[in-house]
Amino acid sequence: MGNMLKTTLLLASLTGLLIIVGRLIGGTFGMIIAFVFAIIMNFGTYWYSDKIVLRMYKAEEVTASDHPQLYGIVKKLATLANMPMPKVYIVHTSMPNAFATGRDPKHAAIAATTGILNLLTPEELEGVLAHEMAHVKNRDTLISAIAATIAGVITMIANWIQWAAIFGGFRSNDDRNNSIIGFLVLAILAPLAATIIQLAISRSREFAADEEGAKICKKPWALANALEKLEYGTALYRPRREDVKASESTAHMFIVNPLKGGGLSSLFRTHPATEERIARLRAM
């Protein structure tokens, strides 16, 4: 199954889950309210998610004179990909990583950490930045933001239902009896399913960005070597006091997961297994 088809089906599943949750809460009216709320949140995500993320990581915009190597690589890749030049940022942390953000190729930003700049060779860095350019080209930054927003809406609604139950939201015996199944779905299963689907979308887009990025820079081996170094470097990374810390809510945006030891199984990975990504790239 193609990555884009898989992503479309997963987004449809996430949207369908939102419809089911809304209907369980309040029938057709509840479904409409859930949709309206999701639209409002997605509107905010569309316009402001890039600004929020860049501010969260205290990203500093750089020009060709500030950092000629980083800026020059991004400019070269934008030309190769026939894309508008994105804004370029540096995040001051020894954590070796990079991410892209923005609603479309005309309003995109690519950020690299000081850690990744110190760890990789110029060709390996080019492979990583090509991967991030691919995310921009494929509009993965918007897709991931929408998926995260819908999943967040579902989880928020479930939390509301939990609080309603705690403070007597289901008052009569009939209400209590009739709400048991719906409560379990909303409080446990719905947020769990939403998270699994959201992370599956994230993993699917990483494979697509690896492939597209390798085609842009024409150096799949450089990206494979970079991923190998980043996996090792992230495992050894110990935050310094002055480092900007990674957030769980944005971990899916980075080229490798900046947080380790948080998942119980492959279902809860924000990224595919790095070994599999490396194997696919070297097969190219």
Image (spheres, grey):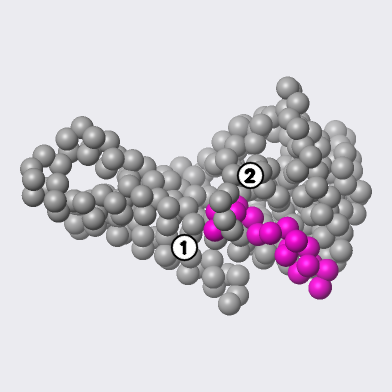
Please report contact status of discs 1 and 2: CB closer than 8 Å, yes or no.
Answer: no
Q: Residue at x 47, y 53 (%)?
A: 195
Task: Look at the magenta stretch and give its main secondary structure.
Answer: helix
Q: Is residue 69 visible?
A: yes
Q: Which residue is mark 1?
A: 11
Please, what is the three-letter code of the amino acid marked with disc 2? Gly
Q: Residue at x 19, y 56 (%)?
A: 27
**Could you tell me which quadrant the N terminus lies in?**
bottom right
Please report the bounds of the magenta region as a residue range: 267-284
Sequence-first disc among 1 and 2: 1
- Nearer to the camera, 85 or 148: 148
Q: Residue at x 73, y 22 (%)?
A: 241
In the rendered view, tell whether residue 71 sits above or below residue 60.
below
Q: Which mark is residue 261?
A: 2
Q: Hey, which quadrant is residue 80 in on the image? A: bottom right
Please, what is the three-letter code of the amino acid marked with disc 1? Leu
